[in-house]
Image (cartoon, helix red, strand yellow):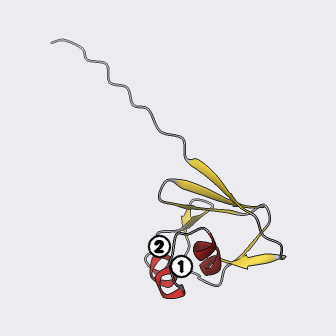
Amino acid sequence: MKKVRISAHIAEKKKKQLKIETDFIRLDSALKYADIAVTGGHAKIIIGDGEIKIDGEPCTMRGKKLRKGDSFEYDGFIYEIV
């Protein structure tokens, strides 16, 4: 039996920055600001479906406050609040 070596390359997630002028931004507003969601209702659906990850865990709280230094993941991208 011939040995076959299999290797996999895990793609690094792309990073994007969201610059805010306030102390915090709500998660649903951040999705609209990042052009992920078109409307607040669309953001609600994305968040409710558990598609957003914060610290590697799905987040379903659309009112979650994100502050400078926080980040969230969606669709292979990491969005950092700066």
**Quarter of the image containing the N terminus?**
top left
- Identify residue for label 1: 60
Question: Residue 26 at x, y = what percent?
Answer: 68, 80
Residue found at x 78% / y 76%? 24
Asked which quadrant contains residue 17, the reply is bottom right
Residue in the picture at 46% in, 76% down: 46
The residue lying at 60 percent from left, 55 percent from top is: 78
The residue at which mark 2 appears reads as: 50
Under mark 1, the amino acid is Thr
Q: Viewed as shown, does residue 42 lie left or right of 3? A: right
**x and y percentages locating residue 80 in the rendered image:** 69, 59
Determine contact: label 2, label 1, CB under 8 Å.
yes
Above or below for 20 versus 40: above
In the rendered view, does 29 fall on the left or right side of 3? right
Query: In the image, what residue type sits under mark 2?
Result: Gly
Q: Which one is nearer the viewer's eye here, 9 or 79?
A: 79
Q: Earlier in the sequence, mark 2 or mark 1?
A: 2
SS for tag 2? loop
| Position of 75 relative to 7 (above/below) | below
Residue that sits furthest to the top in the current view: 2
* Residue 26 - label: none
Percent of width and height locating residue 69: 78, 60
